[in-house]
Image (cartoon, rainbow, N blue to C red):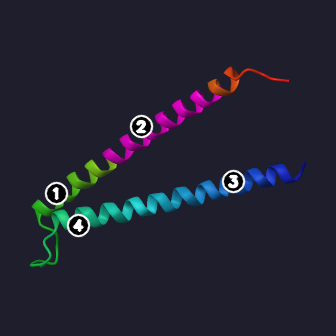
Amino acid sequence: MAALPQLEEDKLKLLQDLEIEMMSDMYNRMTSACHRKCIPPKYTEPELGKGESVCLDRCIAKYLDVHERIGKKLTQLSMQEDNFMKNKITEQPKTS
């Protein structure tokens, strides 16, 4: 029985690593997309201009909002699928 907690610990570690990887990917995509959209390829000043700053703020806010909405929708769909599968399993006629 001592292997069971280790298995759960390994699953938790895997989930944590996956979450870090997904967040890192999201951050990189967001940074790249908002940089491309808001900052011109030729830099004329060393600091961000007001327009660039506002554009970046809005872009990042929209990106995070959409990311959160998608996450909630995927969670909802996953829960519906789990419930559907549980109902299917309990509805199956038992044959001996």
Q: Is residue 57 above or below residue 72?
A: below
Q: Are marks 1 and 4 in contact (CB under 8 Å)?
A: no
Q: Quadrant of the C terminus?
A: top right
Q: Residues within 10 Å of mark 4 (few under 14, many from 20)?
A: some
Disc 4: which residue: 35
Residue labelled with disc 1: 55
Q: Position of residue 52 (x, y in %)?
A: 14, 63
Q: State how far apart marks 3 and 2 are (Cα).
A: 24 Å
* Residue furthest to the front: 96
Q: Which of 41/75 is in front?
A: 75
Give the residue type at disc 2. Answer: Lys
Q: CA distance from mark 1 to mark 4?
A: 9 Å
Give me the C-alpha separation between circle 4 and circle 3. 36 Å
Instruction: Say which label, 4 or 2, has the lower sequence index.
Output: 4
The residue that label 2 is drawn on is: 73
Measured as percent of width and height from the top left, residue 18 is found at 56, 58
* Secondary structure category for the residue under label 1: helix
Q: Which numbered disc, 4 or 2, marks the residue closer to the eye?
A: 2
Point out the frontmost of discs 4 and 3.
Answer: 3
Using the numbered discs, state the Cα–Cα distance from disc 2 to disc 1 in whole angstroms: 27 Å
What mark, if any, has residue 11 been given in the picture? 3
Q: Give the extent of the magenta segment.
A: 65-86
User: Which is more N-terminal, label 4 or label 1?
Assistant: 4
In the displayed structure, 13 sits above or below 79; it is below
**Magenta: predominant secondary structure element?**
helix
Asked if the residues shown at circle 2 and circle 1 are in contact, with their CB atoms under 8 angstroms apart, the answer is no
Say which quarter of the image contains residue 72.
top left
